[in-house]
Amino acid sequence: MRDMPGRPSRRGFLKGSAAGVAIASLAGAVKAQAPEKEAPPPLDQYERVYFNEAEWAFVMAACDRLIPSGGNGPGAIDCRVPVFIDRQLSGNFGKAADWYMQGPFDPAANPTLGFQSPLTPAEIYRQAIPVFQDWCNQTHGDNFENLEAATQDAALTSLQKGEVGLAPELRDFFQFLLANTKEGYFADPSYGGNHDMQAWVYIGFPGARGAFTSWPGRENAQYPLGPVAINGDRA
Amino acid sequence: MATRTDPKKDVVIIGLGWTGAIMGMELANEGLEILALERGDDRSTVPDFQYPNIFDELKYAVRYDLMQKPVNSTLTVRHNTAETALPYRHLGSFLPGDGVGGAGVHWNGQNWRPQAVEYRLRSYVEETFGADIIPEGMQLQDWGVTAEELEPHMTKFESVAGIAGKAGNINGEIQEGGNPFEAPRSAEYPMPPLKNTWDSELFADAARNMGYHPFPRPAANASIQYVNDYGMQLGPCNYCGYCERFGCNNYSKSSPQVCIIDALKRKPNFSYRTRSEVLKIEKAADGKTATGVTYFDEKTGEEVFQPADLVLVCAYSLHNVHLLLLSEIGEPYNPDTGEGVVGRNYSYQMTGGTSMWFRDKVFNPFVGTGAGGMSIDDFSMSQIDFGKEGFIGGSYITCGHTGGRPIQQMSLPPGTPAWGAGWKEAVGEWYGHSLSIGSHGSNMAYRDTCLDLDPTYKDRHGRPLMRMTFDWKDNDIRMTQFMKARIEEIAKSMNPDAMASGYKGDGAQYDVRPYQSTHNVGGAIMGTDPKTSAINRYLQSWDCHNVWVMGASAFPQNIQYNPTGAVGGLAYWALEALRKDYLPNPRPLM
């Protein structure tokens, strides 16, 4: 177990307990024998599969406000959440491949009847981002990514409240953006986000361990082991 | 038109989930030639649910990998008969399963028996409180079968599925530690209860202190090693926290494949085809029997006519009703006139919950089972004075961590921002510090809660989608508000640092977006009067005597429990009638 540079783990899974120290050194020993993983490319050099450059600039900036990097715990950028979203939009989710997408469509229907847009999530991102950028320019004088953090937060709040004039078929944009950002923060790292399982370490979720036979009923005892990913990586 | 006709079978089974597997196994033992048609994929514990790939919250819980894909099959929804229904385009409120095992793969494993009064709800209400208390438009009905009649069949299903629990009433004698309000059982559960998580113990202590009667929730998650009636083995649960929406990697959660299908596959007189969607049940010229089914064979792209002497409709409840409507078996229900039977009395499930946060308590919520935990039945149907309280219905109340998966099971106190620095701070601060007490309640059927064919939207085969008309009604809102008050009393006694409740209130509209429950029932309901039921008390179609319809589509209104226990029990009940009475002399049994 290693600490994230500059952001000590909030819970400190292993700190301060003898068992924790023993497990930590074991994990360290295992890690030392494993070949060093190649660091992924910096986000500005990441080879995008869906987003264009303008969209990428927006998504990077938006994720950084939805889950910012300051304070306790990693932020969305630390966890490479934009990579996750890029990949999701190029895949089945972005294409609405599993969804019923036959018309007629009534995108302005009572929201309790659910998603009714003729557009796929990927198309909604593509069409909504320029509308929102226009709104940011008109209201705040610049593209979203160039605004001060507090102004960005205000703009996202307006987007969340439906105040930026998105057409009905784009009305789910903010919900997708927020949900996808949280998914990328907490999903298995194989999807491109939750880099190094930092988000799992932060909250104390053990990932794909999946065997806790002796744990039911323990009172106020913190589970001592750090997370594992589906590919066997340990944080 | 069918492009291929296959050799005749004795029995064709539509859908290979719990009831399809049960019927297949028992009728294969009778020596009949059986073919099961499953429209989804084949699925087995290995490789489909194996460690560690199954522990993938995004793939299975968020993107619904094991569920029905709306692109292949969905329905339309509206709140009332004046609205235009719109398609349920992606999943949310309920999650029909597909593939071998059906929803029996991804269920939590909460396995209940209805209370005795629930089977004869209309009679019970009239006898006890008078017919005057039944609200206008509520179509209360008896099932036409009693708890006593079903008891041996419920026991059989629990024995096959291997249920862990503690009996509360064995042959009329109340048992310490069990549910004192359950219908009499003939025996103890096949397995002892699961180990409890700490949250459920805290709840049970609080409930006990208030004079209630906590008991372990009956669970289809194995607490010990077990071999069932068909020689199938279950291994003790690992408390992995990946039950609902996942297949079990550990042969611990009862599923059709773990409990039945792997044995059924070895029978020479049983076969099954996947990616084979039944399009229609074909009727004989006189309309009194079915001649077989036409299905779409996705592997060859052909429409196939499969002749059979007996057609068992064993799909998910909604799909059962859809298929009957498409096949014109039974008169379609008309909500304007109240006439017709197929599509009548759709109902759902009324749930609510109160969450609590404790700064100084660590729960490790990822240590969990789909069905473990503690419940009380002190506010169940048999315990409530409907006349005094002003509603008909009831709930069980329950507590237990089913998992701590961070995308979907992150529980944050009221007032937490949905995003930003405050959200991030809160997930670090509060993850694993909460518990939730839930109410799982009945839902009554009304004249206008129903299923029929949509006039506009079509499926991939060009058939009309089914249309659901449903909204919450005052009776059921009053019931859930009653539970809210009871649960909040218990919750406050536990002294949380923060607490929040979520229950339907006045004016609540049915919302297809948030997950609520996959307990869609009714539409092909059982009964003793062909004017008000689609199938008789043995689950046999009134119209075509060789068509039998299994599943929760038979419930005349929803019970206060999860449906699978009753679905399994009804299947064994129907089998007894089939085997002893129908097969020797095929005819309408009523």
Image (tube, coloured by chain):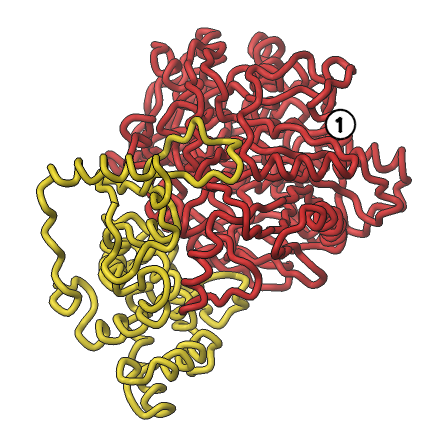
Chain colours: A yellow, B red
Mark 1: which amino acid?
A: Phe
Q: Is residue B228 left or right of residue B134?
A: left
Work out whether residue B96 can be spotted.
no
Other residues around mark 1 within 10 Å, as few (<14) / some (14–19) / many (≥20):
many
Q: Which residue carries the number 1 mark? A: B181
Q: Quadrant of the N terminus of chain B?
A: top left
Residue A124 % position (x, y): 33, 69
Q: Secondary structure at mark 1?
A: loop
> Is residue B514 rendered to the left or right of residue A145?
right
Q: Does any portion of residue A4 appear in the rendered image?
A: yes
What residue is at 74 percent from the left and 41 percent from the top?
A: B394
Picture coordinates of residue B577, whole percent (x, y): 62, 14
Asked whether, in this view, residue B269 is left or right of residue B93, the answer is: left
Relative to B398, say whether A108 is above or below: below
Residue under mark 1: which chain is it in? Answer: B
Comparing B89 with B63, the one in front is B63
**Along the line of sight, the residue nearer the viewer: A191 or B538:** A191
Q: Quadrant of the C terminus of chain B?
A: top right
